[in-house]
């Protein structure tokens, strides 16, 4: 998708290069976009299933491409992973997310007394776990922005955490010891061994949206969702369902004791500047 169709390539430099040079040029395009800090974040709320209270936000990356328009992560994160750009991408996402979070909830949080500060979830690539300096660098960024590591939830997909469980265990344990929360994303789509799962120091299990989105019409999906929530609880993990698209699904999740929910029914991912409005609109 990053490869411009000849018709889409306007006159001039980079578009022509994109069209002529295919995949290779699109990597250069991404590299330049990262350097020019053209990646943007949107934030999607996560709420408590039972009370509806705000629990936190997940940061999701976007690329506003000058010619191809708004690109979704599927259209460029794999490219970054394949071409050694993922560390730079992660750095930029982390920096922007922490800056937004500190500015929005840092100094004078507009919260009811007794309500906990929201959390900030971010997605990590499996490659990040191979980077020895990652733990120290994210810690330094948290300190620079005055955000406690305990407010952060680092999401790893089930498959990425299991790629090299021994190596993962080392980095994940170090992150846990610094106070970061760890979430297993897209749970149910991989086939991890329960034993390995128990050994990795996760705090949260995130039910993949493919099951949650179909829970309303599929008994099978409901069984999967319920089993994952129960598995999580029996392992002492908080459970969260993503892809909650209607009230009935939220009601179902509440009924089975799922802790948190995220999805279009609650809110679509939104730019950081829109969050204050969203917060103001939902609390009377
Ligand atoms: P994910 O972590 O599973 O994120 C959830 C995806 O589901 C997001 O797509 C979100 O916009 C979408 N979504 C949320 N609620 C609903 C809903 O109710 N219905 C439906 N149909 N979809 C919903 P998005 O933003 O396109 O992100 C796709 C994937 O890209 C993410 O999946 C994550 O794996 C990856 N990603 C996003 N941001 C980053 C990042 O900063 N770094 C890395 N490494 N990966 C990222
Ligand atoms: Ca995620
Ligand atoms: Ca997911
Ligand atoms: Ca996913």
Image (cartoon, rainbow, N blue to C red):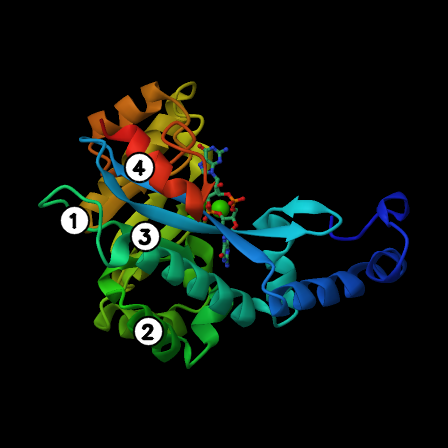
Describe residue 198's horizontal placement relative to residue 19 as left or right: left
Residue hosting label 2: 144
Q: Nearer the viewer, residue 124 or 126?
A: 124
Residue 119, position as x, y percentages in the image: 27, 52
Q: Residue furthest left?
A: 114
Asked whether the viewer can see residue 245, the reply is yes
Task: Decide: few, some or many residues near mark 4? Use Cα within 10 Å; few <14, some 14-19, many ≥20.
Answer: some
Sequence order check, earlier mark of 1 and 3: 3
Residue hosting label 1: 116
Q: Quadrant of residue 174?
A: bottom left
Mark sitting on residue 104: 3
Mark sitting on residue 256: none
Contact between labelled residues 3 and 2, with CB atoms less than 8 Å apart = no
Residue 161, position as x, y percentages in the image: 41, 62
> Taking 172 as reference, is 11 above or below it?
above
Q: Is mark 1 within 8 Å of ligand 2?
A: no
Task: Decide: few, some or many residues near mark 2? Use Cα within 10 Å; few <14, some 14-19, many ≥20.
Answer: few
State the quadrant of the C terminus: top left
Residue drawn at the location 65% of the way across and 63% of the way down: 33
Asked whether the viewer can see residue 188, the reply is no
Contact between labelled residues 1 and 4, with CB atoms less than 8 Å apart = no
Residue drawn at the location 27% of the way across and 22% of the way down: 251
Residue drawn at the location 43% of the way across and 31% of the way down: 264
């Amino acid at each position: 998708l990053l490869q411009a169709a000849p018709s889409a390539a306007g006159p001039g430099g980079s578009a022509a290069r994109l069209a002529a040079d295919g995949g290779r040029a699109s990597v250069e395009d991404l590299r330049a976009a990262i350097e020019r800090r053209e990646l943007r974040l949107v934030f999607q709320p996560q709420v408590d299933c039972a009370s509806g209270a705000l629990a936190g936000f997940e940061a999701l990356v976007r690329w506003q491409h000058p010619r191809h328009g708004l690109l979704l992560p599927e259209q460029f994160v794999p490219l970054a992973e394949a071409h050694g750009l993922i560390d730079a991408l992660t750095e930029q996402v982390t920096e922007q997310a922490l800056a937004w979070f500190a500015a929005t909830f840092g100094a004078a949080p507009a919260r009811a007394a007794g309500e906990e500060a929201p959390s900030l979830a971010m997605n990590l690539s499996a490659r990040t776990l191979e980077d020895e300096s990652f733990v120290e660098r994210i810690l330094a960024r948290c300190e620079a922005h005055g955000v406690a590591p305990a407010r952060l939830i680092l999401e790893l997909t089930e498959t990425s955490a299991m790629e090299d469980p021994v190596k993962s265990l080392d980095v994940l344990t170090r992150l846990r010891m610094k106070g970061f929360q760890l979430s297993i994303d897209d749970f149910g789509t991989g086939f991890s061994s329960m034993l390995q799962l128990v050994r990795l120091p996760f705090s949260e299990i995130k039910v993949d949206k493919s099951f949650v989105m179909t829970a309303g019409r599929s008994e099978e999906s409901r069984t999967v969702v319920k089993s994952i929530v129960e598995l999580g609880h029996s392992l002492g993990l908080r459970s969260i369902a993503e892809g909650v698209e209607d009230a009935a699904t939220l009601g179902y999740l509440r009924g089975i004791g799922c802790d948190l929910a995220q999805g279009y029914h609650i809110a679509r991912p939104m730019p950081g500047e829109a969050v204050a409005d969203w917060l103001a609109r939902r609390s009377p």
